[in-house]
Image (cartoon, helix red, strand yellow):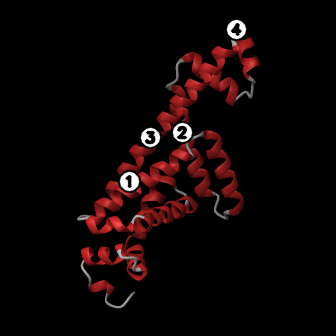
């Protein structure tokens, strides 16, 4: 721990970080990193993703350190950055193909596949809920494409629709699924933030 850093008030500490003092920043990082990591683990069940989110949060704080002098309540500021970072990170994974690829890639380098299985199952459950909210036509097009592996022309023939209509159903289905996933992710992270960042 940097000499004298622990005796500074939070306001003074943030002023030093805003001025580019990397020792003070390290103190802030050490003080709050477990909270961000715990929040991320609660939401993702993945050590790898939690580490990435934690690093991203503190990179943002350092890159925007000039703003710290204006912050009156650092915990609220940290909560906002953590929630936004985690939401944005997980929304980038919200496309089901990306999720599956990320989990597959991660399981190849991780000795603990349990966390990957839990993350996959969580997202799979959210994805299935989102699919059930689709209109019957959108759901059928989506399932024929994603689960049966049919091409749009084959789906059009099977459903007696034009290829254009199939494309529109697919586009709207994907938009709806991404929106549902995004909303669910956001609610989960906001709930977790109340637990870990208060």
Q: Does residue 178 appear in the picture of this structure?
A: yes
Residue 29 position (above or below residue 170): below
Give left or right: position of 88 versus 8.
right
Q: Earlier in the sequence, mark 3 or mark 1?
A: 3
Q: Residues within 10 Å of mark 3 (few under 14, many from 20)?
A: some
Residue, disc 3: 184
Q: Does residue 197 appear in the picture of this structure?
A: no
Residue, disc 2: 125
Q: Secondary structure at mark 3?
A: helix
Give left or right: position of 145 versus 183.
right
Q: Which mark, by number, is residue 192? A: 1
Label 3 – label 1 distance at C-alpha: 12 Å
The residue positioned 55% from the left and 29% from the top of the image is: 131
Label 1 – label 4 distance at C-alpha: 46 Å
Q: Secondary structure at mark 4?
A: loop
Q: Are marks 3 and 2 in contact (CB under 8 Å)?
A: no
Label 2 – label 1 distance at C-alpha: 19 Å
Q: Earlier in the sequence, mark 2 or mark 1?
A: 2
Q: Secondary structure at mark 2?
A: helix
Q: Earlier in the sequence, mark 1 or mark 4?
A: 4
Q: Earlier in the sequence, mark 3 or mark 2?
A: 2
Question: Which is in the foreground here, disc 3 or disc 2?
Answer: 3
The residue positioned 52% from the left and 23% from the top of the image is: 134
Q: 183 or 70, which lies in front?
A: 70
Label 4 – label 2 distance at C-alpha: 31 Å
Q: Residues within 10 Å of mark 4 (few under 14, many from 20)?
A: few
Q: Earlier in the sequence, mark 4 or mark 2?
A: 2
Residue, disc 4: 160
Label 3 – label 4 distance at C-alpha: 34 Å
């Amino acid at each position: 721990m940097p000499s004298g850093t622990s005796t500074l008030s939070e306001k003074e500490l943030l002023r030093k970080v805003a001025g580019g003092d990397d020792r003070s920043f390290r103190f802030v990082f050490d003080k709050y990193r477990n909270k961000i990591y715990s929040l991320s683990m609660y939401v993702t069940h993945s050590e790898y993703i939690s580490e990435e989110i934690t690093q991203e949060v503190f990179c943002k704080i350092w890159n925007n350190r000039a703003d710290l002098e204006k912050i009156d309540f650092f915990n609220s500021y940290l909560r906002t950055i953590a929630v936004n970072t985690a939401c944005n990170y997980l929304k980038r994974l919200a496309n089901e193909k990306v999720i599956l690829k990320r989990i597959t890639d991660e399981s190849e380098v991780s000795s603990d596949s349990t966390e990957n299985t839990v993350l996959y199952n969580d997202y799979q459950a959210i994805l299935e809920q989102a699919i059930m909210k689709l209109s019957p036509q959108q759901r059928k097009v989506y399932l024929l494409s994603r689960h049966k592996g049919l091409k749009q022309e084959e789906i059009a023939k099977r459903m007696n629709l034009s290829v254009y209509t199939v494309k529109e159903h697919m586009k709207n289905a994907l938009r709806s699924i991404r929106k549902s996933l995004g909303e669910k992710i956001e609610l989960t992270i906001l709930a977790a933030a109340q637990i870990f960042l208060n």
